[in-house]
Image: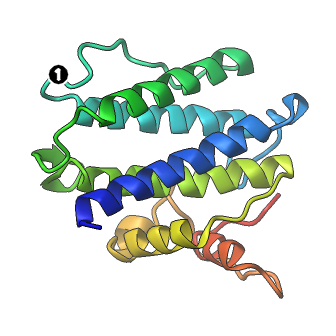
Amino acid sequence: MNETDKLVDQFFEALDQADKVIDSVPEDAWGNQSPCEDWTALQVVSHLTGTLTKVIELQSKDGTYGRQPAIPNESSDFSELLQRWCSARDMVRAGMGNADLDQQVMGKYGQMTRAESLALPAADLAIHSWDIAAATGIERELSGHLLQSVREQLGRVPDEALRRPGIIGPAVEAADGASETDQLMAFLGRRAP
């Protein structure tokens, strides 16, 4: 498998993980506090919808997706927000097959291929799917491939860029017997509420 295919597969694995978690949340759990300070489970989904919107924008710079309306990423109505999530997810899936993933684009950290631009959103989707799962009491383990992908991505980010207010806090101690996923989340300053 070449590097482009690997990056695309990792992104879709993270997207599938987030979608599975979101689909599993009980309706009465959307208001639960997440491990993200000041965010409920619903607000984390709102953030992830924004992440997908950024992917759409970056992948569509040459018109791959055509002109699409911006997808708002804040809402207090869970059904409306879930519809926005589904719309963004479907737009990403539909457009990715048409994108030239080896084309150079200006990403968040400079020039990169479109495939490379998927690495940070993939990590964001994986980490925040854990946040939603932890907030709502559902299965929160990441697959071995996804766990490794997130670790690799985080290893490329300098600690001073990673640990900033509103991004990722200081590491916390993982509970005795914590899974590999929970150990990674503790490194990222997260504990299940």
Q: Which residue is mark 1?
A: 63
Q: Which x, y percent locates residue 25? A: 80, 38
Q: Is residue 80 above or below residue 117?
A: above
Residue at (68, 43) in percent of width and height: 20
Residue 31 is at least partly visible in this image: yes
Residue at (81, 81) in percent of width and height: 175
Q: How many marks?
A: 1
- Quadrant for residue 23, please give it: top right
Q: Nearer the viewer, residue 5 or 49?
A: 5
Left or right of residue 25, residue 162 in this image: left
Residue at (78, 81) in percent of width and height: 178
Left or right of residue 47, residue 173 in this image: right
Q: Which x, y percent locates residue 149? A: 45, 69
Q: Nearer the viewer, residue 46 or 82?
A: 82
Q: Which x, y percent locates residue 164? A: 45, 62
Q: Is residue 73 above or below residue 16?
A: above
Q: Nearer the viewer, residue 4 or 167?
A: 4
Residue type, mark 1 in image: Gly
Q: Quadrant of the N terminus?
A: bottom left
Left or right of residue 122, residue 118 in this image: left
Left or right of residue 137, residue 122 in this image: left
Q: Residue furthest front?
A: 1
- Quadrant for residue 30, please give it: top right
